[in-house]
């Protein structure tokens, strides 16, 4: 995957950008899913998720053993953040944008033709 860095200088971290872009596109996600998508180590992603949650930009909920994160719908600058992320995603390569927006959550039915 070709790396795209749009907001790193503004946000202070490429992993913060990755987390926000992923959650903006998919609405919900967990640390390992985000790390595997961008093929990066898990710990920096977990750190950014925790930092963003402590800043009330993200909220999380426990589902079994998995902690699911999403952008806080009550964040005071939500519209501005969404506008910024929406603009940034326009500059991502088509293949990366497509795979970010492809939000398949359930497994394929057994025997279904690809």
Image (cartoon, rainbow, N blue to C red):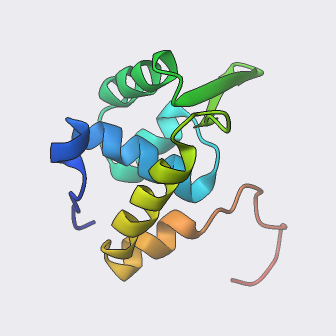
Number of callouts in the render? 0
Residue 105 drawn above or below residue 109: above
User: From this viewpoint, which residue is outermost toward the top?
Assistant: 54
5 and 98: which is toward the camera: 5
The residue sitting at the left extreme is 9
The residue lying toward the viewer, choosing from 40 and 73, is: 73
On the rendered structure, is 90 left or right of 27? Answer: left
Q: Which residue occupies the foreground of this view, 6 or 101?
A: 6
Residue 89, by quadrant, is: bottom left
Residue 71 rendering spot, x and y as whole percentages: 58, 39
Which residue is rendered at x = 64% and y = 44% of the image?
28
Judge from the rendering whether residue 9 lies leftward or rightward of residue 66; answer left or right: left
Residue at point 37% right, 29% down? 42
In this view, the residue in front, 61 or 38, is: 61
53, above or below 103, in the image: above
Displayed quadrant of residue 73? top right
Q: Estimate the x, y position of residue 80 in percent, counting from the top left.
A: 47, 51
The image position of residue 52, as x and y in percent, is 44, 26
Residue drawn at 28 percent across, 66 percent down: 1
Q: Is residue 69 left or right of residue 5?
A: right
């Amino acid at each position: 995957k070709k790396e795209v860095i749009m907001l790193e200088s503004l946000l202070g971290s490429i992993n913060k950008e990755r987390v926000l872009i992923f959650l903006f596109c998919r609405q919900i996600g967990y640390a390992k899913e985000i790390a595997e998508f961008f093929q990066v180590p898990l710990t920096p992603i977990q750190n950014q998720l925790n930092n963003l949650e402590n800043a009330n930009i993200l909220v999380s909920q426990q589902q079994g053993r998995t902690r699911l994160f999403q952008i806080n719908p009550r964040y005071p600058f939500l519209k501005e953040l969404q506008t910024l992320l929406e603009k940034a995603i326009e500059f991502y390569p088509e293949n990366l944008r497509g795979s970010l927006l492809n939000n398949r959550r359930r497994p394929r039915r057994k025997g279904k033709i690809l």
